[in-house]
Image (spheres, rainbow, N blue to C red):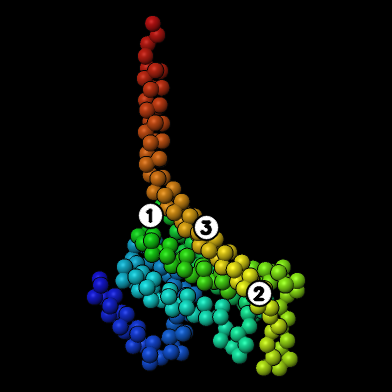
């Protein structure tokens, strides 16, 4: 399997170098349909380990880096995204929902650790682009007293930012992001442990109910003294 993964990595690196535009389209498509497609194949037990490892080790890091690039926009000013800009990214949560639902509801999963790592990484990146910016703007307004003033009169004009307020707002955003990651990990651990404990619990329940039924049957069959 290691040789197959190595071959896939080398082929993808060569493709990335030669076709950056096509790579962006393929990665975007992989993000939109990748989680749902893996759930579809996983349910039918037709998902290859090579596909999962390649997606987790190659596609997910590329997606995360691409999303984080929007958190630190490489513009003339490097201003934080405005509400009208970052709210465009909220639909990015939708492709993750099928994998979340499958992870939390399925009793048997072939790759629980890889799925958990993918979900946490992608969720953190999307959170920074959506709710993270909500926290940032809210914290900035609470500290500074007013929101960020975006001029936009000409392209060379930058937003009016207070340095101390920006640093505090980023700290609030980072704390919220870390809290999300911790909550996701805890929820996934608890969900998998509960699912793993269901068969034994169900078996013990069935056994106890069977013993009770046998005892009641024997009791009804005993003659009265």
| Structural distance between the alpha carbons of marks 3 and 1 | 22 Å
Quadrant in which residue 144 is drawn? bottom right
Q: Mark 3 Cα within 10 Å, few/some/many (few <14, many 20+)?
A: few
| Circles 1, 2 touching at the beta carbon (< 8 Å) | no
| Circles 3, 2 touching at the beta carbon (< 8 Å) | no
The correct choice, above or below, for 193 with respect to 24 in the image is: above
Residue 210 located left or right of residue 160: left
The correct choice, above or below, for 65 with respect to 21 in the image is: above
Expressed as whole percent of the image width and height from the top left, the position of residue 126 reads 54, 71
Work out whether mark 3 precedes mark 2 in sequence or the reverse, and give the earlier one. Answer: 2
Residue reaching furthest to the front: 164
Asked whether the viewer can see residue 36, the reply is no
The residue where tag 3 is placed is 183
In the image, what residue occupies the spot 56% across and 86% down? 74
The correct choice, above or below, for 108 with respect to 19 in the image is: above
Q: Mark 2 Cα within 10 Å, few/some/many (few <14, many 20+)?
A: few
Q: Secondary structure at mark 1?
A: loop
Work out whether mark 1 precedes mark 2 in sequence or the reverse, and give the earlier one. Answer: 1
Quarter containing the C terminus: top left
The residue where tag 1 is placed is 108
The residue where tag 2 is placed is 164
In the image, what residue occupies the spot 52% across and 81% down? 69
């Amino acid at each position: 399997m290691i040789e197959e993964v190595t071959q896939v990595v080398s082929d993808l690196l060569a493709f990335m170098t030669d076709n950056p535009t096509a790579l962006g389209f393929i990665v975007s498509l992989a993000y939109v349909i990748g989680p749902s497609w893996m759930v579809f194949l996983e349910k039918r037990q037709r998902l290859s380990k090579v596909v999962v490892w390649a997606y987790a080790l190659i596609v997910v890091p590329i997606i995360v880096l691409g999303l984080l690039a929007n958190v630190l926009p490489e513009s003339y000013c490097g201003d934080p995204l405005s509400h009208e800009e970052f709210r465009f990214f909220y639909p990015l949560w939708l492709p993750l929902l099928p994998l979340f639902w499958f992870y939390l509801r399925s009793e048997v999963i072939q790759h629980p650790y890889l799925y958990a790592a993918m979900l946490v990484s992608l969720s953190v990146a999307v959170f920074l682009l959506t709710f993270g910016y909500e926290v940032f703007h809210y914290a900035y307004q609470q500290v500074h007293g007013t929101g960020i003033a975006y001029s936009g009169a000409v392209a060379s004009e930058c937003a009016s930012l207070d340095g101390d307020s920006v640093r505090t707002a980023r700290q609030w955003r980072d704390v919220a992001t870390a809290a999300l990651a911790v909550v996701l990990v805890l929820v996934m651990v608890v969900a998998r442990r509960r699912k793993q404990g269901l068969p034994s619990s169900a078996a013990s329940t069935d056994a106890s109910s069977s013993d009770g039924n046998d005892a009641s049957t024997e009791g009804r069959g005993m003659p009265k003294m």
